[in-house]
Image (cartoon, rainbow, N blue to C red):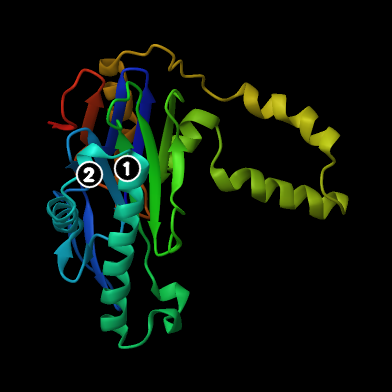
Amino acid sequence: MTVAVICNLSDGLIMGVDSAVSISDMDGVQKVFEDGDKLFQLAEKIGVATYGLGSLEGRTIGSFIHEFEITHTDIGKIPISEVVERLRLFFFEKYVAFAEHYFSTKFDEIPDDKKGPLSLIVGGFSPGEFLSEAWLITIPANRDANSAEKICDRGSFLVKWFAMSGPIDRYLTGFDRDFLSDTSDFFVSVLGRPFTDEELARYAPIRDKYMYRIFLDAMPIKAGIEYVRFLVQLVIQHYRYMSEHPIVGGQVKLGVVTYKGERFRLLE
């Protein structure tokens, strides 16, 4: 698993991941590399962050991204939405071929719980655009054409986090994502009915009161870089000391692209 964070600002886009990569088979995790690559440059002004499966066919995900780049030579000249669709199709076909070979059966006959997901966050600038955007591809769930999810449109300034990001939820909102659901189920069992819309509306200000507010409007890129670094490091350090330790760790890896014409670049 992984923690991945993106921050979309008016001056550009920042991505952050941890560096732990696991190699698994039917018997579970066989090896963990703490210096793996899960953040990549694509074309000139696009970055890709990956989480989920760390390899396919014995190859790193990065090697497939490089194969995609050299076999799709016009991706720097088309909108990111089209790059995302081509990337979705490319990885879905690779995934299906690998799964059918591994399980020696047709893809649709493989149980869903055996199909480990591979997710790719794709973000940056389309040609001629001065604001950045980001998309999420999840394989094999996004098997249909144009089924990738747009995380943020141009002009939408936000921070979002993915995968093993529970510590960020608790830090920023004051509760884990599952807490509200479990609390709601408890009160339903006590009351014998769900909350009404009026009751939920009365509760929302109490819940929202304890959320931290982060001002992203006009945040400088340098501040955004440090903020993403902080959030990824928060998760790494949290799981470093937890008794249950999912595969999150290693170092913080960051990438950034801005409107000023430079390439998506990886930061040390």
Which residue, given by chain and number where applicable, does mark 2 sit on? 75
Residue 61 as seen in the image, left or right of residue 103: left
Give the quadrant of residue 252. top left
**Residue 233 point in image, percent of width and height:** 29, 34
- Figure check: 237 above or below 117: above
**Residue 152 point in image, percent of width and height:** 45, 34
Say if residue 261 shows up in the picture. Answer: yes
**At x 87% / y 49%, what residue is drawn?**
191
Residue 142 as seen in the image, left or right of residue 50: right
**Residue 189 point in image, percent of width and height:** 80, 55
Q: Mark 2 and mark 1: span between their CA atoms? A: 13 Å
Between discs 2 and 1, the one toward the N terminus: 2
Crowdedness of circle 2 by 10 Å Cα count: few (<14), some, many (20+)?
many
Which residue, given by chain and number where applicable, does mark 1 sit on? 122
**At x 28% / y 61%, what residue is drawn?**
90
**Residue 258 point in image, percent of width and height:** 25, 22
Crowdedness of circle 1 by 10 Å Cα count: few (<14), some, many (20+)?
many
Say if residue 164 shows up in the picture. Answer: no
Which quadrant, please, contains the N terminus? Answer: bottom left
Residue sitting farthest toward the bottom:
104
Q: Amino acid at mark 1?
A: Val
Nearer the observer: mark 2 or 1; the answer is: 2
Give the quadrant of residue 25. bottom left
